[in-house]
Image (tube, rainbow, N blue to C red):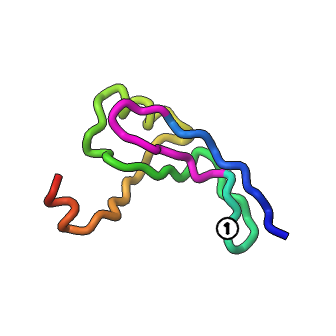
């Protein structure tokens, strides 16, 4: 039987879309990811000051950014 997981609501930022907290998902070891610790997003390079303030005040605050774009995608920006 498949388990349906509750997904978190998106964070509303003006210049990045589909920003979501990955907390609440169950990993392969059947452990729940902590809320407020891992976010996923697009277009972080386009954030304004208000968006940055929201991210810094969310959960534990953003400490690291991991850019998974290829060099080609970065160059296109």
- Does residue 52 lie above or below 44 as drawn? above
Most extreme residue toward the top, as rendered? 50
| Viewer-nearest residue: 56 or 9 | 9
Disc 1 target residue: 27
Q: Position of residue 46 (x, y in %)?
A: 26, 40
- Is 39 located above or below residue 48 in the figure? below
For the residue pair 15 and 48, the one nearer the viewer reads as: 15
Q: Which residue is the extreme one toward the bottom?
A: 29
Q: Which residue is at a point 31% across and 46% down the rendered structure image? A: 43
Give the SS element for disc 1: loop
Q: Residue at x 40, y 53 (%)?
A: 64
Magenta range is 12-23
Residue 61, image x and y in percent? 48, 40
Name the one closer to the observer, 72 or 37.
Answer: 72
Residue 63 lies left or right of residue 35; in this view the side is left
**Image quarter for residue 62?**
top left
Q: Is residue 49 magenta?
A: no
Is the residue 72 above or below the residue 61 in the image?
Answer: below
């Amino acid at each position: 039987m498949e388990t349906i997981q509750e997904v978190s609501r998106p964070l509303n930022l003006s210049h990045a879309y589909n920003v979501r907290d990955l907390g609440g998902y169950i990993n392969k070891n059947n452990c729940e990811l902590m809320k407020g610790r891992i976010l996923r997003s697009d277009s972080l390079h386009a954030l304004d000051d208000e968006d940055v303030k929201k991210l810094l005040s969310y959960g534990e605050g953003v400490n690291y950014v991991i850019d998974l774009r290829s060099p080609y995608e970065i160059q296109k920006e």
